[in-house]
Image (cartoon, rainbow, N blue to C red):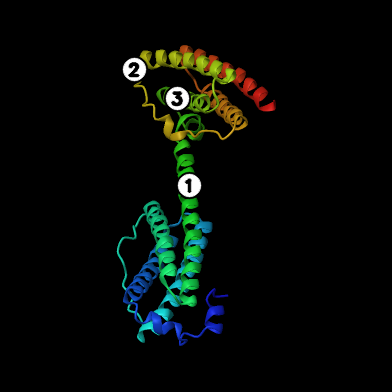
Amino acid sequence: MNPYQFYRQFKPFHLDGYSRVQENQSLIKDIQKAINGEYSAIACYKKLAKLAPTVEEKNRIREIRKDEMHHFKAFSDIYTNITGVPPTPQLQEGCPDAYKRGLEFAIKDEQETVDFYLEIADRAQDTYIKESFRRAAADEQNHAVWFLFFIIQNRGNRRQERQMNYGAKGALDATSLTVPQMLVYAMQDEYLAQARYDRIIQNFGSVQTFMRIKEAELRHITALQTLFQRYGVPLPEDNSQAYTSTPDSIKSAYAAGVQGEIDNIAMYNKFLTYNLPQDVRIVFTQLRNASQNHLAAFERGLAR
């Protein structure tokens, strides 16, 4: 049901309250601005819905767009009854062509619109106008929450997509591997482990399990660096911070450690199926065995 139908049924526009509003040119100007904003949002969200990467997001943005169409109709009716002429909506510029920037634009616009509509509601003397803009402000606040959720959700999706080409996940996804590629993936995975431990220690303090394993894996980095030098392979840049997040609890930290070691062991097992130089095979075997010990330590921590 249209949220404004109740007011249309029980409070026609021609009641005396509107005679006071007709004098208020500032209010009329703001209502025109609100109409332009809704008209532009309808166009912008049509574009965003097409750009959205999932069916869930497309459908939710379409529902938000329907709300904006209700607002546009309600505000246009108010304007027509105050002025005696229908509004001439104008399309505002600014809606980006990229989805991420579109979400950022939408959430900023929705938040600003909430304040604007509440200001109109406070100034208006007519009950119908007050309620119309207050209800619209509540809708806009809800829209802002959804757009923020989509921003966060897509940020997580992008991290997952990047991880598929980094460290153990990248190695496990690769269809073929050379020794230099193996070394790069192995070092990236060690970078990830160090970044993960740094975040955990910073957030939860000097937890002995993580402190001990962090120190052990620094030795892994040293062993790998020797192979990089021996085979003339450039060390990869350490950008592991872009692929890690801070666990929300110590249990989550242990769970992340378990998953990290499972991936690490699977990576080295895959490497060891290849015909490797003996020195490379020895190092990879040692690192795989150490990761099995680390996995057992994390599993004990998770079971506490």
Q: Is residue 67 above or below residue 217?
A: below
x 44%, y 67%: residue: 122
Q: Is residue 63 above or below residue 73?
A: above
Quadrant of the snapshot with the N terminus = bottom right
Numbered badge on residue 152? 1
Query: Which residue type does callout 2 highlight?
Result: Gly
Q: Secondary structure at mark 3?
A: helix
The 10 Å Cα crowd at callout 3, few under 14, some 14 to 19, many 20 or more, is many
Query: Distance of mark 3 from mark 2, alpha carbons?
Result: 20 Å
Q: Is residue 285 visible?
A: no
Q: Secondary structure at mark 2?
A: loop
The residue identified by callout 2 is 232
Q: Position of residue 249 (x, y in %)?
A: 59, 33
Tell which circle, 3 or 2, labels the residue nearer the N-terminal end.
3
Tell which circle, 2 or 1, labels the residue nearer the N-terminal end.
1
Query: Distance of mark 2 from mark 1, alpha carbons?
Result: 41 Å
Question: Looking at the image, which is closer to me, 145 or 32?
Answer: 32
The 10 Å Cα crowd at callout 2, few under 14, some 14 to 19, many 20 or more, is few
The 10 Å Cα crowd at callout 1, few under 14, some 14 to 19, many 20 or more, is few
Question: Looking at the image, which is closer to me, 143 or 210?
Answer: 143
Q: Position of residue 25 (x, y in %)?
A: 32, 77
Picture quadrant of residue 85: bottom left
The residue identified by callout 3 is 191
x 42%, y 55%: residue: 107
Query: Distance of mark 3 from mark 1, alpha carbons?
Result: 25 Å
Closer to viewer: mark 3 or mark 1: 1
Q: Is residue 147 above or below residue 4?
A: above
x 55%, y 28%: residue: 260
Q: Position of residue 27 (x, y in %)?
A: 36, 74
Closer to viewer: mark 3 or mark 2: 3
Q: Is residue 41 above or below residue 157?
A: below
Q: Position of residue 205 (x, y in %)?
A: 54, 23
